[in-house]
Image (tube, rainbow, N blue to C red):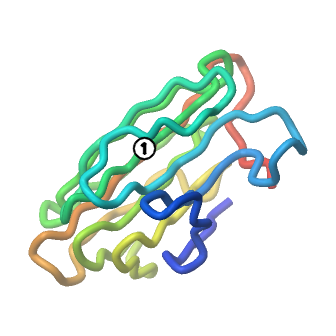
Amino acid sequence: MRLLLRANAHRQVDPTRWEVAASPDTPRRERWQWQVCLLTGGQGQSDAPLPTAHKVAAPLPRGATVEVAVDPARVAPAVEILDPRSSPTVVRAESELVVLIASGGRVLVEDRHVLADADALVLAGDDPLSVGVHRFDGADSRVAVIRLAPVVDSAVRWVP
């Protein structure tokens, strides 16, 4: 699965917090597994209550923060911030779900998706397992790479 999420599609949770993606994204529909949010205003991790949540966060350009909350019994999170000037390749296992979020400028992913500031690309399943990331414009552009790996034998999926 490849899903492009533009910044204006993110759900505003409170004045400084936007939910980029979550599973499930409909509250109380399925057992909660993970959530990726962007925080603005120089805040660190939020105090939003989530069931059995383990949180990791990383700073982005312009005072923003990416925050990942997971159910640690089901998902192991990792966050890495890449500089697209070095044209890195993001490789993932088929069982992982990866969310790429642009920050501070536009980036080109997979030589076909231009992500503007706060746009996201979700990759899951077998489509694709590796993508190239390049700076499109903006000297301060960065890409947050959020990896969600399964703790149990099944793959991490997005439950809409």
The quarter holding residue 39 reads bottom left
Q: Is residue 22 left or right of residue 102?
A: right
Count the labels in the image. 1
Q: Residues within 10 Å of mark 1 (few under 14, many from 20)?
A: many
Residue furthest out toward the front: 15
Q: Is residue 27 left or right of residue 145?
A: right
Seen in the picture, residue 26 relative to 111 is either above or below; the reply is above
Residue at 57% from the left image edge and 72% from the top image edge = 5
Is disc 1 placed on a helix, strand or loop? strand
Residue at 69% from the left image edge and 17% from the top image edge = 152
Seen in the picture, residue 15 relative to 98 is either above or below; the reply is below
Circle 1: residue type: Glu
Residue at 42% from the left image edge and 44% from the top image edge = 67
Q: Is residue 126 left or right of residue 42?
A: right
Q: Quadrant of the C terminus?
A: bottom right
State the residue in front, 105 or 84. Answer: 105
The quarter holding residue 141 reads bottom left
Residue furthest out toward the right: 29
Q: Position of residue 122 (x, y in %)?
A: 56, 59
Seen in the picture, residue 113 relative to 67 is either above or below; the reply is below
Q: Quadrant of the N terminus?
A: bottom right
Residue at 38% from the left image edge and 38% from the top image edge = 45
Q: Position of residue 51 (x, y in %)?
A: 69, 26
State the residue in front, 67 or 139. Answer: 67
Q: Position of residue 27 (x, y in %)?
A: 81, 48
The quarter holding residue 86 reads bottom left
Residue furthest out toward the left: 139
Kindly identify which residue carries mark 1: 67
